[in-house]
Each structure stands twice: as C-alpha cells, then as structure tokens.
Amino acid sequence: MEIQWRKSSKSSNADGSDCLELAESGGEILMRESDNPDVIVRTTRTKLRAFLGGAKAGEFDDLA
C-alpha cells in the first residue's frame, strides 16, 4: 500500500520544500519534512490531537 502524503496549502514556497507532510498508515499518523523525506516520525491520533490543540492555543508561537 502506497502512503498518501498530505501537506498544508500554507506551505511557504512554490516547490513545497518548506513544509511538514502528514499521512495515515496502519493506524499510525506519520510526519516528515518534505526536504528530508527519509526521516519519518510516527505518532497516534490522540497525541497529534493534543499537539494540534496546543498549537491552536498558541503554546508554540515563540518557536515560529
């Protein structure tokens, strides 16, 4: 089964090399950087949901 990677429409450049890509495979959420696709971080939906909630609340704004 081929992994279908998705990236945000907010990616910062035309070729999409400045973005994180997400996919779902085997019940896991996969993340990678588009310019380093061989490094894949695996997590769960629950952990991703918690992270996204923190990001929406501004908890990581100082890093951007």
Image (cartoon, rainbow, N blue to C red):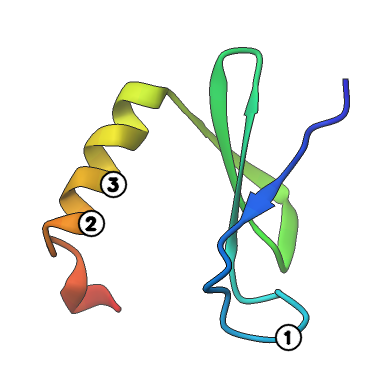
- Residue 61 image label: none
Query: Picture coordinates of residue 42 (x, y %)?
Result: 53, 31
Pointer 1: what residue?
14
**Residue most toward the top?**
26
Locate the C terminus and report the quarter of the image it occupies: bottom left
Q: 35 or 6, which is in the foreground?
A: 6
- Whether pointer 1 and pointer 3 mark residues with C-beta atoms closer than 8 Å, the reply is no
Query: Picture coordinates of residue 35 (x, y %)?
Result: 72, 68
Query: Picture coordinates of residue 5 (x, y %)?
Result: 72, 45
Pointer 3: what residue?
52
User: Image quarter for residue 56?
Assistant: bottom left
Residue at (65%, 13%) from the top-left corner?
Answer: 26
Mark 1: which amino acid? Answer: Ala
Q: Secondary structure at mark 2?
A: helix
Mark 2: which amino acid? Answer: Ala
Q: How many marks?
A: 3
Q: Secondary structure at mark 3?
A: helix
Locate the N terminus and report the quarter of the image it occupies: top right
Q: CA distance from mark 1 to mark 3?
A: 25 Å
Pointer 2: what residue?
55
